[in-house]
Amino acid sequence: MANPPVEEIRALVGHSFPGGTYTIAHWENFLLTDCTGAEPLPDDLAHPVALFHMPILGAGTSIGEMFGLGQADSGVSIGIESYEWKFFQPLREEQPYDITGKITEADRKEEGKRTFDRIRFQFDLHEADGSPVARSTVTWHYNRRSE
């Protein structure tokens, strides 16, 4: 498959996801905490590992859609550069969060013989009153064939 035109990749900047809400259920937090080997957190605090999936789902998108936007050849053509989390207040169980998401960067990069499209997704979590809770910034590399 040929590389998508770089103009199509750059045009992704500013793309917004529909947005929505997400609530971390008690059972979900229990399972996430258990699979990390940690003890449950006190006072209905949710384990931060929830930021791997909840922002994506809460913003009304999916891993599949994110692959599609970058025109990934397959799941193995994706490389993870980083997941950055910023907390403004703790995550809590059974608390609905409003979530928005958008693409903030998208460009083609060449490093030696390697060509990839670098796409950065930003997801923001807020309480119903608009107070910021957390930001998750995900940067992926969509590996391309050298031209």
Image (cartoon, rainbow, N blue to C red):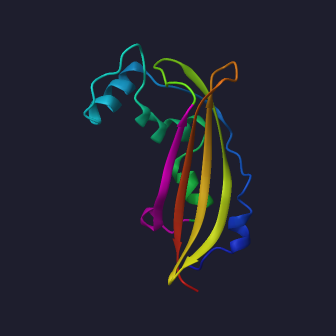
Q: Quadrant of the N terminus?
A: bottom right
Q: Residue at x 63, y 36 (%)?
A: 124
Vertical relation: 118 (above or below) 94: below
- In the picture, residue 87 is in which quadrant? top right
Report x, y in % for residue 38. Answer: 27, 30
Give, as a single range, the part of the protein colored magenta: 72-87
Q: Is residue 120 magenta?
A: no
- In front of the other: 110 or 103: 110
Horizontally, is 36 left or right of 131 in the view? left
Q: Residue at x 39, y 19 (%)?
A: 26
- In the picture, residue 147 is in which quadrant? bottom right
Report x, y in % for residue 144. Answer: 54, 75
In the picture as drawn, the residue positioned furthest to the bottom comes out as: 147
Report x, y in % for residue 146. Answer: 54, 84
Dominant secondary structure (helix, strand or loop) of the stretch shown in magenta: strand
Vertical relation: 66 (above or below) 44: below
In the picture as drawn, the residue positioned furthest to the top comes out as: 43
Q: Residue at x 42, y 65 (%)?
A: 76
Vertical relation: 1 (above or below) 101: below
Report x, y in % for residue 17. Answer: 67, 44
Horizontally, is 127 left or right of 38 in the view? right
Horizontally, is 145 left or right of 40 in the view? right
Vertical relation: 78 (above or below) 34: below
Count of marks placed on residues: 0
Q: Is residue 73 magenta?
A: yes
